[in-house]
Image (cartoon, helix red, strand yellow):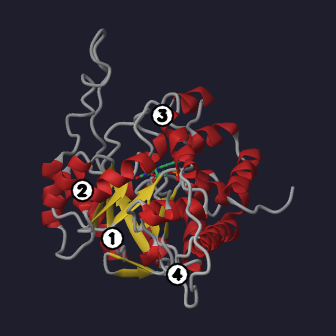
Amino acid sequence: MTPPLCAQDYAELARSRLDPAVWAWLESGGADEHTAQANLAAWPALRLRSRVLRPMAGAHTRVTLGGQTLAHPILIAPTAWHGLVHADAETATALAAAATRTPYVLSVQSGTPIEALAALPEPPLLWFQLYAQARREDTLALATRALRAGARALVLTVDAPVNGVRNAEQRSGFRVPDTIRSVHLDGLSPPAARPAPPGGSPLFDSGLLDAAPDWDDVAWLRDQLPAGTPLWLKGILDPKDAHLALAHGIDGLIVSNHGGRCLDTLPSTCEALPAVAQAVAGRIPLLVDGGIRRGTDILKALALGAQGVLIGRPVLHALAAGGAPALAHLIQVLRGELEVAMALTGCRTLADVDARVLY
Ligand code: FNR
């Protein structure tokens, strides 16, 4: 095989190297995977408008996101347990992130503590993703720990109060091995689940949702955090929720359907993004993830109103294929593809990218 040239090449390499159950864990979507597939299909279905002979001298991909200036608009999405795909686990991801000046949104389900990544000789720009815990104090403790370690923003994921129905993963028999732990959750109390009584509601009688977070918990967390702490919500698809987020003083939104892993038949993020962008109307920054595999996908996401994108599965594919160097290469490839797309649509900077690049 020729060396990997694009995200899909890394996906194929990963598939050939990983245990089939681990592959099923990382690749699967919810139920029949309509949304996971729609994420992938929607970006390439949009057509770009070619513009020629436009001046390109001084072109760049810099973007400012909530006061932080980034070299390019690609971030690493939070994904659990990188140790499942490479022995260097989250350290490999952090090295690649630092080498490519890519913000790394560390998952609360990381097997490596944030302090260890922050202590690397050249640490990446770290953001920290968390879920609201059953006890509010636990959520705050996680946030405080991440901020102390140097996280520059907090990302509260709100679209997964329960796990999606992931049949492909279930069929594979995937189990998290004992060697892999979510180190940030050690010592915190998980939600108390009880078996539903015979004939009872499988979920509603399980107690799992009794402590599920709501907007009051978001308001409480916003209030407890030191003033000026950037707090993002991840998993927003509906403009009504975007309005509520604005009313709760949220600093940025990630339009996401969790890579199609939660509720199947939700719209693709490409379909959902324009309405959220319209609701937010530039008041806070917007990111989007789900199915971003090409520089052209990134350009389209920006054209539809996002200021940047996150990549999830491709990170795991590259790590599985070759650890930190492979991931750094993949990010450079995506950046290069974005630059080609900008050049051929006549966009000198990302400020030039808007709906006019689309048919
Ligand atoms: C995820 N995602 C996720 N999101 C989150 O907020 N916390 C997490 O711990 C995880 N874990 C996780 C594991 C795996 C294996 C996958 C594939 C995804 C969702 C992730 O952040 C992101 O929203 C999607 O992966 C984006 O879609 P793509 O790029 O994978 O198509």
The picture places residue 290, in percent across and down from the top left corner, at 49, 51
Q: Indicate the secondary structure of the residue bearing disc 4.
A: loop
Do the residues under discs 4 and 2 have CB atoms within 8 angstroms?
no
Residue placed under numbered mark 2 in the picture: 279
The residues bearing labels 4 and 2 have C-alpha atoms spaced at a distance of 27 Å
Q: In the image as oriented, which residue stretches furthest toward the right?
A: 1
Nearest to the observer: residue 61 or residue 93: 61
Q: Indicate the secondary structure of the residue bearing disc 1.
A: loop
Amino acid type assigned to the residue bearing label 4 in the image: Arg
The residues bearing labels 1 and 2 have C-alpha atoms spaced at a distance of 22 Å
The residues bearing labels 4 and 3 have C-alpha atoms spaced at a distance of 39 Å
Nearest to the observer: residue 191 or residue 100: 100
Amino acid type assigned to the residue bearing label 3 in the image: Gly
The structure residue drawn at horizontal position 57% and vertical position 73%, both measured from the top left corner, is: 342
Name the N-terminal-most of marks 3 and 1.
Answer: 3
Count residues near mark 4 (Cα–Cα under 10 Å), then give few for <14, some for 14-19, many for 20+.
many
Residue placed under numbered mark 3 in the picture: 30
Q: Quadrant of residue 50?
A: bottom right
Establish if 160 lies above or below 65: above
Amino acid type assigned to the residue bearing label 2 in the image: Ala
The structure residue drawn at horizontal position 31% and vertical position 58%, both measured from the top left corner, is: 277
Q: Give the label on residue 348, or none.
A: 4
The residues bearing labels 2 and 3 have C-alpha atoms spaced at a distance of 27 Å
The residues bearing labels 4 and 1 have C-alpha atoms spaced at a distance of 29 Å
Do the residues under discs 3 and 1 have CB atoms within 8 angstroms?
no
Q: Is mark 4 within 8 Å of ligand 1?
A: no
Q: Give the label on residue 153, or none.
A: 1
Amino acid type assigned to the residue bearing label 1 in the image: Ala
Name the N-terminal-most of marks 1 and 2.
Answer: 1
